[in-house]
Image (cartoon, helix red, strand yellow):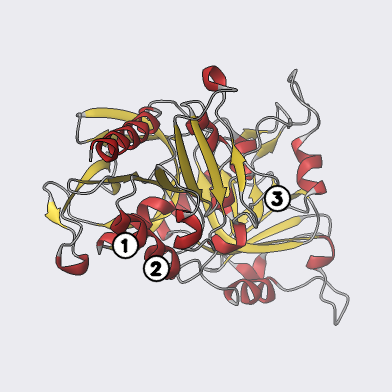
Amino acid sequence: MNQNDSEAVDFSLDDAVLVLEDGQVYVGEPYGAIGTTHGEIVFTTGMTGYQETLTDPSYDRQIVVQTFPHIGNTGINKEDPESSRIWVAGYVVRDPSPNVSNWRATGSLDDDLTDNGIVGISNIDTRKLVRHLRSAGVMRAGIFSGDALIDSGTGKPRSVASMIDEVRGIPQMKGMSLYDEVSTEQMYTIEPCGQFEGKEPLFTVAAVDLGIKGMTPHRMAERGCRVHVVPSTITFKELEDLHPDGVFFSNGPGDPEQADPEVNLLRQVLDAGYPFFGICFGNQLLGRALGFGTYKLKFGHRGVNQPVKDLTTGKVEITAHNHGFAVDAPVGRPVDAPYGDGKYGKVFVSHVDLNDNVVEGLQCEDIPAFSVQYHPEAAAGPHDASYLFDRFVELMRSAKEENANA
């Protein structure tokens, strides 16, 4: 149920209530844990991969709405998580599956949400909700169920107005720094795998964890790389001591304008001439390091079916996304990177989104650095963009050969 008039909303203490900061209210059934949660409410268009979505650190502090109506029928397993925990702040689905049917399943999604303390809501009109978010833009929201629906002072059901006030009191995503919150505390290493398992690595990569997904270093390891996944707090000297052939900046949550320490680290990486590859948050940080600004998208790109054009090849790829911010750079021609009177040379927008022409990739002409806004590790998602890891390997190979011949 959805009601715009918050004073007329009728709910019982067995219900779950979703309130948006603009006053919209949805009454449904509890899904997952009982209680209260707040965050920026966003939607993802993926038909599959809900377990990867839930465990993507980029969703930290966000309530995720699934546009696909039927969620949970394959349950959960121990192979698909992209990190060690569920990161979403809350979960909104229309029709949770009452049954689990998959040979890999080790439990139900409902139980997993409960065990992880993730408050959710089900059986609401998610189509109407998503249409509203596309029109009004993503915003702060809260889910309330169980005792969270009771006024602690009177013991009676809370007013919807008090829930809306509570939601309006939480911080907005713009201006929020979250990458340190999701980063690893200690370095760990992924050794070469697949056909390279047990062999000496072809290259060593320092991957700065700003909210990295587990499949990302695995994709590099499949190509013969030893990947040191390092905390966001790493210093440039500590990074140098790893003797990397290339440096990678991962995806992650929060506002890139609040990441000055990482921008400064990246500029040191570029100044030292290390080959660089960044995805998602890493793309935004490369944009900032080069001197461009970033801005908040109205409702962002989240899902595994976003069409992007590679302007260097003319190829259109179907790609996986999870971002609410974008780089503000000119599309159509190479320009001098604004930072430091053009010290990083020419840069051009290499990829754009076909739906709204948002910048989806950057390519430097005079230094070995490039980035994309989407998730080429494809977990979950299509594999159209997997060649980008090959491009990074070739960048490291060229740099290594040049250094050997110098």
Residue 210 on image: x %, y %: 52, 55
Q: Which callout, 1 or 2, points at the residue further toward the start of the chain?
A: 2
Residue at (25, 62) in percent of width and height: 292
Residue at the bottom extreme, as displayed: 153
- Mark 1 or 2, closer to the camera: 1
Nearest to the observer: residue 167 or residue 207: 207
- Separation (CA) of disc 1 from disc 3: 37 Å
- Mark 1 or 3, closer to the camera: 1
Label 2 packing within 10 angstroms: few (<14), some (14-19), many (20+)? some
Nearest to the observer: residue 34 or residue 52: 52
Residue 290 on image: x %, y %: 26, 60
- Labelled disc at residue 257: 2
Q: Secondary structure at mark 3?
A: strand
**Residue 63 falls in which quadrant of the image?**
bottom right
User: Residues at badges 1 and 2 in contact (C-beta under 8 Å)?
Assistant: yes
Instruction: Look at mark 3 in the image and give the residue it sits on.
Output: 121
Q: Is residue 368 above or below residue 141?
A: above
Q: Secondary structure at mark 2?
A: helix
Nearest to the observer: residue 326 or residue 200: 200
- Labelled disc at residue 288: 1
Q: Secondary structure at mark 1?
A: helix
Label 1 packing within 10 angstroms: few (<14), some (14-19), many (20+)? many
- Mark 3 or 2, closer to the camera: 2
- Say what amino acid the circle numbered 1 marks: Arg
| Number of numbered tags placed on the structure image | 3
Residue 28 on image: x %, y %: 71, 50
